[in-house]
Image (cartoon, rainbow, N blue to C red):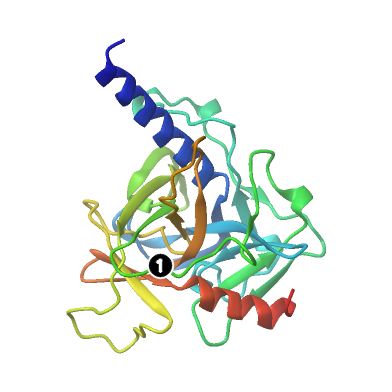
Amino acid sequence: MSNIEHVDELRKQASEACLIRVTTHTVGIINSIRVEGYDPVTQRQGDGEEAGTGCAARWGNRHFILTAKHVIHSNAKPSDIRLFWRPTSGIERTADAELKPQDIIDGVPIRDENAAIYRCDWEDLAIIVIDPAQAGPYTEFVDIENDWIDPAEKEVVHCCGFPIDKHILVGSRWVGKKEERGIAIRPDLFSGEVFYYPNFLTDDYAPEKHYLVPYDHPKRPEGFSGAAAWWESDQHKQIWKPDFKFAGVCTHEYKDGTIERLVKASVVRKFLEEVFGTV
């Protein structure tokens, strides 16, 4: 193996390790309460379950799924929500055309009788408090009390979520005069440099609470709502390993989906202190 091939292989392994680390904290959220409206998948009016993203996290010894408030239906109870936990210990790269029914896993209903939903009154944030024993075996709860940061301008953050545009149609059926389609969604990652001062008009953005990141994918970032942002340390160590800190939550989009708004980690911590108290 040449030096160039060796470096390329190391970069590939580092990229895989980073993606594995980020996805250990990423959870898909599915609302079982169907919502009337325009379905971006079928591109027609209808009703359907809505999906979003969450982050497995903890505050002291309290475990929860952190997400954007609008991801969870306003009337939902914990039993109305299904969670999609990471299914394997590695990164599976299977082409859409090669997927088989047994490769697709549905979200798991919350069966914890003590689970509870807390919605923030002043920001688009919510948590689902849950017994960590309910989590999948390849999920880890990030410690937001200690492993967090508010990134500075021009620093890069990474966001992992379940965008609706990355869906796969897995079946359809007719119920009366209505067609119901089943889709599978896959995780995706986007990264970008942080900036704090928009060059467009908006009345719902506050730099003391939020920051912005470009979103350069072909389609809108629907489904990334509730996704956590991750800041990667550039500190050089003798033995390298992925070193991420929690850096906030995606909640809104601007400019036709080309810019994503995130709530700062410090603001998330303020909400958690309201719910749980100071650790």
Task: Identify which residue is drawn at 81% across, 65% down.
Answer: 114
Task: Identify which residue is drawn at 59% across, 32% down.
Answer: 88
Figure quadrant of residue 77: bottom right
Tell which residue pokes out farthest to the front in this image. 238
Residue 159 lies, with reference to residue 251, above or below; the image says above
Front position in the image: 65 or 82: 65
Give percent across and percent down for residue 184: 45, 42
Name the amino acid, label 1: Pro
- State which quarter of the image contains the N terminus: top left
Give percent across and percent down for residue 39: 36, 59
- State which quarter of the image contains the C terminus: bottom right
* Residue 119 visible somewhere in the drawing: no
Front position in the image: 87 or 172: 87
Identify the residue under disc 1: 151
Residue 124 lies, with reference to residue 50, above or below; the image says below
Task: Identify which residue is drawn at 35% across, 86% down.
Answer: 204
